[in-house]
């Protein structure tokens, strides 16, 4: 799977995705700024799943999951440090059956569970 990493994710997200056998590019590396709409357009245009901590992407009215290769929103405390963020994402990526369910869906990843929309 090919992931677009949002600016609010730690740089260590890229190597983690690569270790799990995925391709990954950071929004800064493709010249994207903080504009959610531009990030969403890029993800759709390049068939990339988006990984972010921006809960705006969890609004399925604005970002219908079926229009994307997947949207992963990490719902963690605002003060979560990089290793907590990476650990939560690592736990998600380690569960192959969850990754297989991702295309066309929104996955909200918390430290203790993952919720999918649509279910």
Image (cartoon, helix red, strand yellow):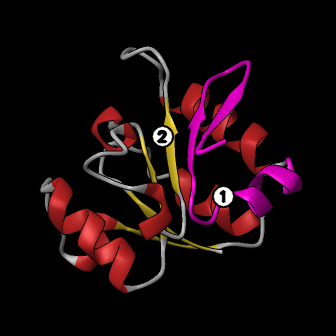
Task: For marks 2 and 1, give the CA distance.
Answer: 12 Å
Which quarter of the picture shows residue 2?
Answer: bottom right
Identify the mark nearer the N-term, 2 or 1.
Answer: 2
Q: Is residue 7 left or right of residue 94?
A: left
- The label on residue 102 is 1
Drawn side of residue 3 relative to residue 34, left or right: right
Q: Residue at x 47, y 19 (%)?
A: 80
Q: Circle 2 — which element?
A: strand
Q: Is residue 21 magenta?
A: no
Q: On the image, which quarter does residue 85 sit in?
A: top right
Q: The N terminus appears in which quarter of the rendering?
A: bottom right
The vertical placement of 112 against 53, above or below, is above
Residue at (65% x, 41% y) in the render? 89
Residue 47: x and y in percent read 47, 81
Write the start and end of the magenta stretch as one range.
95-119
**Residue 92's spot in the image, x, y percent?**
73, 42
Q: Nearer the viewer, residue 40 or 52?
A: 40
Circle 2 or circle 1, nearest the eye: 1
Q: Is residue 64 left or right of residue 14?
A: left
Up the image or down, 109 lies above or below 11; here it is above
Left or right: 29, with 72 as reference point: left
Q: Position of residue 22 (x, y in %)?
A: 68, 72
Residue at left offset 40%, top offset 37%: 53
Where does the image place residue 13, in percent across and percent down from the top left?
54, 52
Say which residue label 2 marks: 73
């Amino acid at each position: 799977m090919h992931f677009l990493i949002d600016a609010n994710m730690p740089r260590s997200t890229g190597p983690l995705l690569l270790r799990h056998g995925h391709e990954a590019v950071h929004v800064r590396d493709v010249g994207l700024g903080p504009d959610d709409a531009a990030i969403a357009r890029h993800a759709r245009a390049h068939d990339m799943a988006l990984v972010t901590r921006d809960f705006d992407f969890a609004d399925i009215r604005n970002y219908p999951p079926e229009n994307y290769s997947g949207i992963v929103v990490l719902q963690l405390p605002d003060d979560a440090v990089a290793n907590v963020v990476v650990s939560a994402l690592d736990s998600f990526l380690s569960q192959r059956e969850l990754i297989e369910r991702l295309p066309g869906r929104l996955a909200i990843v918390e430290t203790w569970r993952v919720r999918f929309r649509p279910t």
